[in-house]
Image: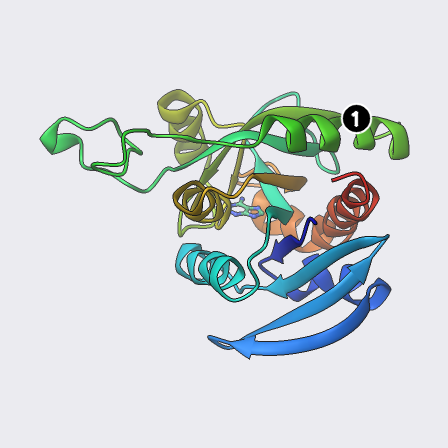
């Protein structure tokens, strides 16, 4: 039977899911509260991992080892790197990579973790399709794209940095956890998908837009997660 780990970095990315689920158990590890129970007829573990790649990686490993989840979904918000993705739209990961990994001096591609054998971690095709189909069904007014998540321990709010993420990595959205969740899921052989609603354009307007739009964007993403999980 499926058991789905659902990770959000911030409380507002998981609060709706936690309030709507039936909780059977709460376990604290590494300062994170893992809420185990059922949501929309699915067995789930919902957790706020905190911001950044280290928090996300720790959380993934706890979900793998302690809860033995069969699938992982990362829900949250992101800055858009793609002109087709506006604030409020949704990006579903085709794959994810670390934009702040750089060992090019020894011949690796920018973003490639040495000795892994791949630069980008592919999301699970079935989860990607399910997320896309569910989004079109339950949120027909929301523009949804499948694309690349690029992650780093930085909030992107500078046009030149944004351009570098587009030209260097062909990123469609930037955030701060997805690649670590993807990386951990890849090592543990757990199918994953990242779902991110756009809160800002990752440029000089991001500082203003992010606080204005993050709550609504986070709700869009969580609503899609809730709708899709019963079909996993
Ligand atoms: N999450 C939401 N917007 C972001 C941005 N511009 N950079 C990094 N993470 C984000």
Left or right: 132 as drawn, with respect to 8 = right
Image height check: is 129 above or below 59?
above
Image height check: is 216 above or below 195?
below
Identify which residue, 206 or 173, lies in the foreground: 173
- Which residue corresponds to mark 1? 133
Identify which residue, 204 or 100, lies in the foreground: 100
Q: Classify mark 1: helix, strand or loop.
A: helix
Spot occupied by residue 159 in the image (x, y as percentages of width and height): 46, 33
Identify which residue, 23 or 163, lies in the foreground: 23
Spot occupied by residue 98 in the image (x, y as percentages of width and height): 37, 40
Q: Is mark 1 within 8 Å of ligand 1?
A: no
Q: Residue at x 31, y 34 (%)?
A: 111
Image height check: is 165 above or below 56?
above
Spot occupied by residue 122 in the image (x, y as percentages of width and height): 48, 30
Q: Which scheme is used to colour this image of the protein?
A: rainbow
Residue 163: which quarter of the image?
Answer: top left
Residue 46: which quarter of the image?
Answer: bottom right
Spot occupied by residue 65 in the image (x, y as percentages of width and height): 47, 62
Quadrant containing the C terminus is top right
Furthest residue in direction front, as rendered:
1
Q: Residue at x 83, y 26 (%)?
A: 136
Q: Residue at x 82, y 57 (%)?
A: 39
Left or right: 105 as drawn, with respect to 147 = left
Q: Residues within 10 Å of mark 1 (few under 14, many from 20)?
A: some
């Amino acid at each position: 039977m499926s058991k789905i780990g659902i990770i959000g970095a911030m409380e507002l990315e998981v609060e709706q899911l936690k309030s709507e689920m039936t909780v059977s158990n709460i376990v604290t590890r590494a300062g994170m509260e893992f809420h185990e129970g059922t949501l929309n007829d699915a067995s789930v573990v919902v957790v706020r991992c905190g911001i950044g790649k280290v928090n996300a990686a720790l959380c993934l490993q706890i979900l793998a080892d302690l809860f033995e989840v069969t699938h992982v979904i990362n829900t949250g918000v992101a800055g858009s790197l793609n002109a087709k993705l506006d604030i409020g739209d949704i990006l579903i990961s085709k794959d994810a990579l670390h934009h702040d990994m750089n060992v090019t001096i020894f011949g690796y591609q920018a973003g490639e973790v040495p000795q892994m054998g791949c630069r980008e971690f592919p999301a699970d095709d079935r989860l990607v399709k399910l997320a896309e189909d569910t989004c079109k069904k339950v949120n027909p007014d929301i523009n949804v794209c499948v694309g690349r998540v690029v992650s780093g321990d930085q909030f992107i709010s500078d046009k030149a940095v944004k351009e570098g993420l587009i030209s260097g990595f062909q990123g469609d959205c930037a955030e701060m956890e997805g690649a670590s969740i993807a990386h951990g899921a890849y090592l543990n052989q757990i199918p994953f998908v990242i779902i991110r609603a756009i809160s800002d354009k990752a440029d000089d307007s991001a500082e203003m837009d992010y606080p204005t739009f993050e709550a609504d964007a986070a709700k869009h993403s969580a609503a899609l997660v809730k709708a899709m999980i019963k079909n996993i």
